[in-house]
Image (tube, rainbow, N blue to C red):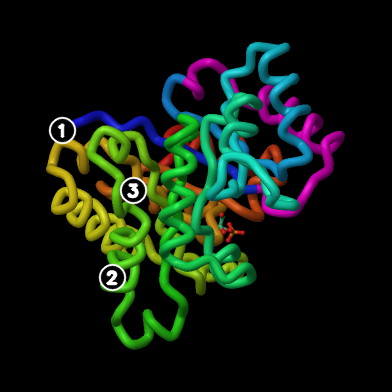
Amino acid sequence: MTQRKPLIAGNWKMNLNHFEAIKLVQKLAFALNDKDFDKVEVAVLPPFTDLRSVQTLVDGDKLRIVYGAQDLSQYDAGAYTGEVSGAMLAKLGCTYVTIGHSERRQYHGEDEDLVNAKVQAAYRHSVTPILCVGEPLSVRQEGGHIAYCLAQLDGALRKIGAEQAKSIVVAYEPVWAIGTGEVATPEDAQEACGALRMRLAELYDTEVASGIRILYGGSVKSGNIKGIMAQPDVDGALVGGASIDADEFAKICRFSDMPG
Ligand SMILES: O=C[C@H](O)COP(=O)(O)O
């Protein structure tokens, strides 16, 4: 089976200005060592306004932390006030960009077509999408969560060929577990991540599917990461609230050193 290096990505959401960003990344770099980075890829996803400062710090100090943005425009340039293009993110050295986060879908009305257009935009500029999917509580209560997530995956990957899909990161984030303290059980995470991988195999092939990293997100903390990461189809975590505390985020990144 393909070896998938775990990815722990911190989505800061709309938190921390560029001074605070520098402080957090410095603290994180101090808390982690080369052995940690050999085992886990560590990414931070700050607000747009912090990216240049994070880039300067990462490049200047040759840190092994990678970084990315939380969104991008579907367009490459032009009269789109307030938007940030994939080309701009690439120029800032962004490795990743989250696309289709439930907060974008919910508060900014992002639908499947827009998510798909953004995935294509990210690939045009060689920025790797972290594609978020996940069901709201009502859907889970009705038992439709797997079908819901698979439909989101299908929609997002339209017109994306195997060569591009190989590098995508998918994040399963049940909406009811985001910022609520209500973490999905490791079994819930495995059920969804396993189903997503099977669908990736149907859309592409088994080799492509077995190389794609699928993350879990939703109230991840140092106290629950170990159990989640023990699941065979979970390859990392997209961490929200706990990622703006450097010590806690570093502990999450070191999940493999935890006892039990
Ligand atoms: O992108 C991260 C997720 O929305 C999870 O956020 P959370 O860890 O605060 O629940």
User: Which is more N-terminal, label 3 or label 1?
Assistant: 1
Mark 1 vs mark 2: give the one in front.
Answer: 2
Whether label 1 touches label 2, CB < 8 Å: no
On-image quarter of the C terminus: top left
Residue at horizontal 42 percent and vertical 25 percent from the top: 39
* Mark 1 or mark 2: whose residue is earlier in sequence: 1
> In the rendered view, does 167 fall on the left or right side of 210?
right
17 to 203, vertically: above or below: above
Q: Find the distance from the CA under tag 1 to the CA under tag 3.
A: 14 Å
- The answer to whether marks 2 and 3 mark residues whose Cβ atoms lie closer than 8 Å is no
Task: Give 89 or 83, whichever is nearer the viewer.
Answer: 83
The secondary structure that most of the magenta stretch takes on is: helix
Q: Farthest residue in the right direction? A: 19
Secondary structure category for the residue under label 2: helix
Q: Which residue is mark 2?
A: 146
- Residue at which label 1 appears: 1
Residue 199 vs 61, above or below: the answer is below
Q: State the residue in front, 40 or 51.
A: 51
- The range drawn in magenta is 12-37
Using a 10 Å C-alpha cutoff, classify the residue at mark 3 as few (fewer than 14 neighbours), some (14 to 19) or many (20 or more).
many
Earlier-in-chain disc, 2 versus 3? 2
Secondary structure found at label 1: loop
Task: Give the percent coordinates (x, y) of residue 192.
Answer: 30, 62
**Was residue 68 drawn as part of the magenta stretch in this picture?**
no
The disc labelled 1 sits on which kind of residue? Met
- Residue 57 coordinates in the image, percent (x, y): 74, 20
The image shows residue 99, relative to residue 54, as above or below, that is below
Q: Quadrant of residue 179?
A: bottom right
Residue at 71% x, 30% y is 25
User: Mark 1: few, some, or many residues within 10 Å (few <14, many ≥20)?
Assistant: few
